[in-house]
Structure formats: structure tokens, C-alpha cells
Amino acid sequence: MRDAPIPFWRDTPRLAFLLALAVLFLMPYIWMAAVSVKPRSEVFSGSLQLLPQTWNAIENYGRVFREIPVGRYLLNGIIVCALILVFQLAFAIPAAYALAKLNFRGRDTLFAFVMLGLLVPAQVPSIPLYVAIANAGLLNTYAALVMPFTISVFAIFLFRQFFKAMPDELIHAARLDGMGEFSLVWRVIIPNAWPAATAFGIFSVVAHWSDLFWPLVVINRGDLYTPALGVLHFRSEEAGDDYGALMAAAALVTAPLVAAFLLAQRRFIEGITMTGLKG
Amino acid sequence: MSDVVAATPYRLVRAAPMRRAGEAVAAWLLVAPAVIAFLLMLLIPTLAMVALAFTDFELGRTSFRWIGLENFSELLEDRGFRQSVQNTVLYVAFVTPLSILGGLGLAMLIEAGLRGRTFFRAAFFLPVVSLMVAMATAWQYLMHPTIGPVNNLLRSIGFAGPNWLGSSDWVLISLGLIGIWENVGFNMVLILAGLTAIPRDLYAAAEVDGATSAWERFRLVTWPLLGPTMLFVIIITTIRSIRTFDTVATLTQGGPNKASELIVWTIYQEGFTFLRMGYGAAVTVVFLIVVLGLMLLQMRLVERRVHYG
Amino acid sequence: MTASTLHPSRRMALHVMAGAAGVVAAPRIVRAQTVEITAHYSMPAIFKLAQEAVAEEFNRRQTAVRVVYSNPTPSYEDGAQLILRGAATGQLPDISFQGLNRLRIFAERGLAVDLRPFLAELGDLRALGYTEQLLNLGRANGIQAGMAWATSNPISYYNVDLLRRAGLDADRFPTNWDEVIRWSAQVKRLGGVEGMFFRWPGDDWMFSALVFGFGGRMLNADETDVGFAGPEGLNALRLLDRFVREGGMPNYTGAADLQAFAAGRLGMMFRTTAQVVGVRESVGRNFELRTARLPIIDPVNGRLPTGGAGGMIVTRDPARQRAAFAFLRFCTSVEGTTIMVRNTGYVPTNQLALDEPRHLASFYAENPLFRPATEQMPLMIPWTPFPGANSVRITETIVNNLARIVESRATPEEVQRDMANEVRRLLRARA
């Protein structure tokens, strides 16, 4: 809020507090990373020892790469999340524009109805959807993984806010130029929706990259496994997990998300800013 | 923003009927793909499940009977369902305000200076990205009553740490703490955006008007302008905490003795573990009705106080 | 139970019998082409090596049938879900390895093929190593729903170094529970460690071990009423209560006991033998690990529940059924079970593998940790699956009630009464 840079010594309490809190927040991850390089016999001990006595990283990560096709699963994750995002944007942006800027009968009822979609947990429509997809012969396909998520109520909500905040002059100017609604959407709205789309993209990817429930329902062919399913391979309630490999797998699967967030971070904040959540 | 609309020439706002009809057609065509996807992927399957609430359908059987309201009358007597509802209410009441306040606090602290923003944003957002399958083990270890670091720390300062995940008194609190951990980063990012959108000159103007303390600045400028953001955050956070499932499924499975059972876990368990899809659907129906009512109430209450632009 | 139709499994059984009879009666034309069957199993973390090894050996030995695996599901529950969902859509593997106690669910829904006709063709089952006891493990709802493939029973794990530190003679591990309780209290007095943990959470398997140990059963003979409402049930609950009150058993959930044990802070652990490989690796060289039989309660009538997986045939096509059965027969043959034991450490499911030392004697000599489970084999009886639509829910009800004892919120008498009432209600609710 202040533009003048605060001298370091005055900034210290704030930074120290944030740092302490950050370490606390990161504790599970720090432990996870530590376990991924330890041999199994060192994972649990009476005291918190983060540094391994025996460096087991090669065995753990090696085991992950040996037992599951990590590259393949990551590729599946990328394909599925990308497809989902594309469809979500394609459906949500025009709809949000219409709900935000156009006047038509039934608009508010439609919006209220769509908001209901936020409330329904994923487990509820899953069985009927499964039966429908199976009967259509689409089990074990990318389509099955992508279809249920193409409608994102969160996206419609977010983009609607964004478009409400967008100056009407832009749109009126385009209309005065003789543009029809569709080319308006294509040529004016979508290019300007870019910041919000980046923001939404992060939320969407984060949600679907780690999704376990739906892939377990529609996929049982190894080459279509998503990254999260790959991690499950090392989980075994009955025999006890191979913790080192499990954490190594989890680290490998989480790393791309973290990298993506760091890269997109600035755009991401900017993007939400311009959704004009302020009004 | 909205004052732009006020400045628009009157004739453009008062469009001719012909224009309005054309606009309506275009509007419906634009919303069509989303509406169709909504119908196919969300509404119709949900309605199918709602219909199942009046049957005795079980997973794996190929036929079922209509049994009317029998599932619902069983629901009324179900101690487990009552416990689940109670737990969910407590959980949401605990997690929602704290994760919103936490997100707000963090956002303000991070924005207060220029140093380390990237690092802190990433650090607090990381829990949102977490894969519960792996996190479960981490939490079980960290909260282990005998060998966990949390209790070790408490012991070193003289307190006997509770059995975080094993005691029916503490398990809901522990899940709540994990829920806050997961949600704070999410809220922080949304609020950060809202904060960075507030024009700096407003703060300058406030100072000129005599608002010298940080609290005054917050009360007069920040808080009102964060209104719409906060509305969004409140709705989203409430819904997210009501829909909590992963932590219950991987850490406690509702135990011990249903002390940590939350409503979406009940829906899942009834339908998928106990295989009684009809009964699970009945729970779903009650859940949707209640939550819908809550949402409408909340929106009406909060929106009234929100100050738009 | 559906209102107006013939009981599904009886209908299915008739179909299967008709189909099987048809196949047997048909002229024996030797087909040149290979039948490929799809097999499914759960828990790749345990069974991947064993399954792949046994399939490889089977494929190698003959060319009439080729076994191919669909992707394994992470847990028994996911595996059951797969089949149950598949029932609605016809997307099913030919053979599936399911948790033994779930076979009943499939039998009740007519999804499991009755194996009796196929077994009848094999001739002298006892000579092939299939005892009544082993076959019984795969029986459910009146049919032979499957055949046990890998079984487990509860054993004792203990930390030799910790016990010795507490002044106990680790070379003479207790054979009865009173002594275990005394030892546990003694270990706990060291401070900062726990003495014992009996794995009661999760499901009613370990509790069954106590009830069976007293000579009781979970259900009565004709499955109309609970079996634990009598003295055996009460004694089992009282014993659990004593673990907590006298032995100081902590209230662990999830994998907390495994974690504490691996860290060397838990003296004795009572759990399924399926964990041996995992525990051995977690312990590493931190301390000396040993296993022993579960302490005996009633030396004459005491029994133990059986966990593990069994193979179930799902396909309705007669040719594929024969092929699937050929594979299942190999899996449970003395060669197949030897492969399984060597790769998992579970208890063998063919009597010959135990009677004839040439198969596994060297394995047990090199791996003494696996021996107690195998020694307990004569005591194994099926883990009771409760009948009807509420079967899984009943298990949960039992676990919830046990939690009340462990948290010392109710007396054994109260818990027995409540548990019996609740389970009875659930048994009656959907016949």
C-alpha cells in the first residue's frame, strides 16, 4: 500500500513473522521432500530428523520411474488438463459475456440456476454419468476424463465479474462499427479476457491435475492414468506404503504444478485483479 | 466501472424492441454451449440421482424397486446422519471464518512491503496444490501422538499433546486445522488481487482527510473496497468447506465412531462403500436443499452490505 | 432382494450350470486358436510381482489360454467398485481377484460364477491339495464363488531390543493374553514408549480374531442373528478393555501403530501377516524384529479369521469360463501358490505346498518372519461377511462401537448390548 520502500530493519518483524508462518505451512512438504530421499527404515523415528543418514534418492526416485511410466502419466495430465481448460473457457466466456452485458429475458434466473452447480459435489452425478459414458463406449478415453468438467460454474462466475467490470465503451464502439455479437465476442471479448483466463487456468489445472475420484471411475487402462493415479500405485493400506517411493512420486507429480504457478504467478494476480473483484 | 454505464448516451441504453429481440437471440446462442454442457453433465445426472432417492437401488444389482419416502424416514432416525450434519456445521463454522481472516491477514502482510512477495505467495499457495494421497501420510506423522513433531514440541514446553487424529474430542478440530491450512492460500490469492486493485490515491486522499493510523486506513478505504472480493471469497470458501471430502477419506474415514464424519463423506460412503445408492441419494437430496437455502440466505444478507465501486 | 423376480444368484447359477453342462456335453473338438482372458486384481503394491510371475509361468506352460492383465486397482474397495459398476454396463474382466470377504457381495448379485461344476471335473480335490477348509474360504451364498489365492491371518510382531530394555525375555514371547498385558505395562513404564497395539480399527477382522479365539462366532449358524451376543463376545470385549486399562494400549488410528513400531517406540503389534514385508523394510536395521503366533485363548475351540484375496470368475461366456478356470486352477495349484508365497509372504492356499517340504521349506528357513502365519493355518476360518444389503455397514457399526471401549467411554457390557442391537436391526432391515 505504501510506495516508499520500507527500510530493512523496520521490515524485519513482518518478514520474520511471515517466514516463521511460511515454514510452518511448508512443514508437510518439507517432510515429504525429506522422506523422498530416505530409505524406508529411516522414515519414522522418535525425533524429527530431516536429513537422511543414507542418501536413498536414487533408489526411491528410480523405483518410481521403473514401476510407473512417469513421462506418460505427466503427458496424460497435461493433455487432460489442457483439454478441460480449453472447453471450460470456450463454454464459459461467451456465456459469462451474455450474462454480464446482454439484456434478455430469463437472464437472472439462468444465472441463479447455474450457481446451483457450485453446490453439487462430484460424487453425486458420477454414477449416472459413468453409466452413460460406458453405454456410449467411451470408457478409457480422454473424452471420458474431460467431459464432466467442461462446464465450470466457477469460471462463469469469475468471468461474469470480469466482464461486468469491463468498460461498456469498448463494446459499444465495436457495435457502432457494425460488428455482430459473435464477431464481437471473438474479436473483442476473448482477447481482452486473457488476464482472467490465466487466473482461472491456474485454479482449473490445480483442481484437475490432482483429481483422483473421477479417473478411478472411468479409467482402468494403465496408459491413460493421470498423474495422481500414478502416485496411488505406491499406496497400500494393507501392506503399508513404501513411503520413500510414495513421496518421491508425489514430489514428481506436484513439481510441475509448482513450476507452473511460479511462472504464471504474476500474470495470475494481475488476472484476478482485473476481474474487477473490487466491483 | 459502473459510472461508465451512467455516462452512456440514453438512446443506446434504451434499445429498440427489434434490437432487443436480436440481442436475446444472440444471448441465448452464446449461453447455449454452456447450458447444454450444464444439462448433460450436471443437471440431468443429478436429477437421476435425486430420482434414485425414492428407490432401493444398490450398486451392482440390475433391478430396483420404488419405495417412496422410506429412505427419508430412515434418514430421520439415523444417528449417523445427525452426527454428520452436526459435524459439518461445526467444521464449516470453524474453517470458513478462520481461513478467510487468515487469507486476509496474510494478503495484507504480504502486500505491506515489497520484499519476498513471490516467495511468500508461492509458499502459502502450495497447500492448495497438495495431493491428499501423499499429504495424508505427512499429516498422520506430524500429528502422531507418540512420535509426531507437533506433540514432541508441545512436550518440550511442558504440555501433553492430545491424540490429534485418534481422539473423538480432537479429530474434528484437527481436520479443521488441516482445512484452514488448505484454504488460506486460496483465499489469500483472491484477496491479494482485490487489494492490488485498490487505487493508491484513495489512501493518499484518506490521509489528507485525517486517517493516519493503519486501522483507520483499513476501515475507511480497504475494507469497503474489498467488499465484492470478500463476497466472492465468502461464498467460495463456504462451499469448499461444506464439500470437504479428501481429508476425511484419506485420514480418518469418518472415525473414530463418526466423530469426524462430514456430509459429503456420508454421501460417498452410503453409496459407494455400503453400496446403498438409493439411501445415499436421499442424503444428497437433503444436503442440496439445505445448502441451497443457506446459499440464498447468505447471498441476500451479505450482498446487501456490499459496496460496489 | 428384488420383489418379483427369482433370486438373481439362483437364476445365474442355473444359467451357469446349463452353460457348463452344455460345454461338457459338446463333442470335444480341439480348437487351434488361443483364448485370451483378462484378469484383474487389486493392490499392486503387494501383488504385482506375484500376479505377473504366476501369469508368466501359466502362459509359458501352455498355449491354449493367454492371460492379460487390466490395470490393477489400488485397494480391495476400488476393486469391488470396478466389478459392481461393471455389472451395470457389462464392462467386466474375465477373472477378478477380490478380497475374500467380498465374494459374498458378488455371489448375492449373481456376478460370481459358481465353480462347483469346474471343480467336479478335476477329480480328487484332496489329492490336488484342495482341502475342505481351503475350499470353504471361497464359498459364499451357497455357491463356490471363488477360490482362495493368497490368505493372511493375524500374528504378533515385536521389537526384541525394546522388550529386552524393559527387562523382558524376548526369546520367550507370551502365548497368552494375560502375559501380553503384563509385558505391555512393563514396557510402558520405560516412558516415552508404548507397550502394545491390537489393530482393532478399520474393520472387524481383528475383533473377529478375539471372538473366534474364545470359540465364538460373529453370526449364528443359520445367519439369522449375531453370534457375539453371548459370553464369547463379552469376553472379547472385556479383553479389549483390559488392553487399554491394564496394558495401556494407546488410541492409534490409521497407520500410526506401524509408524510408532518402525520408530522403535512400540513394543508389540498385533496385525495381519500381510504387513510383514512392509514392516521388515520400515524397521530395517533399527532394531531386531521378530514375529510370533497370536496368543492363544481357547486351545481347542479357538480359531482365526482369514484375510486375503480369492480369484472369482466373472465372464458368462462358456469358453472363456473354461479358460479362466484353467488359470485359476494354476494359481491355486501347488506351483502357483509357491510362486505367490515367494513373492508376497502370504499363507499358501494349497495344502500340498505345506505338506511337501520341497516346495517351501527353504523359503521358510530363510524367512522366519513368515512362518507364524503358516503355522496358524489349521485355525483359519472365513472372515464373516454379513448377509444382506447392510453388510458393509454392519462392519462399520462394529468398529464404531469398539472405539467406545478404546476411548473408555462405555463398558464392555454396554457396548455388547448396543452393538448387538444395532447389528440386529441392520440385519433385519434389508433381508
Image (tube, coloured by chain):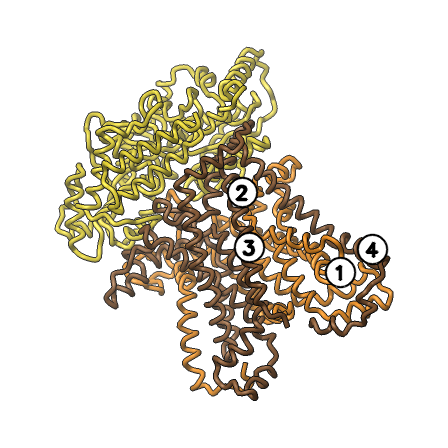
Chain colours: A orange, B brown, C yellow
Identify residue for label 3.
B295
Find the distance from the CA under tag 1 to the CA under tag 2: 34 Å
- Residues tagged by mark 3 and mark 2 found on one chain of the structure: yes
User: Chain letter of disc 1?
Assistant: A
What is the crowding at mark 1: few (fewer than 14 residues within 10 Å), some, or many (at least 20)? Answer: some
| Residue underneath mark 2 | B285
Q: Which residue lies at the image location 69% right of the left edge and 51% below the top edge?
A: B34
Answer with mark 3 or mark 2, whichever residue precedes in sequence. 2
x then y, percent, for residue C190? 16, 55
Could you tell me if residue A235 is visible in this image? no
Q: Is circle 2 on the same chain as circle 4?
A: yes
Task: Classify mark 4: helix, strand or loop.
Answer: helix
**Dot 2 amino acid type:** Val
Q: Nearer the viewer, residue C69 or B241?
A: B241
**Which residue, given by chain and number where applicable, does mark 1 sit on?**
A102
Labelled pair 3, 2 in contact (Cβ < 8 Å): no
Residue at (66, 37) in percent of width and height = A136
Residue C385 is drawn in which quadrant? top left
Regarding mark 1 in the picture, which secondary structure is present there? loop
Residue B40, image x, y percentages? 66, 44
The three-letter code of the residue at mark 3 reads: Met
Do the CB atoms of the residues marked 2 and 4 lie less than 8 Å apart?
A: no
The percent position of residue C199, horizontal first and vertical second, equals: 29, 43
Q: Are marks 1 and 3 in contact (CB under 8 Å)?
A: no
Q: Which residue is mark 4?
A: B21
The tag on residue B301 is none
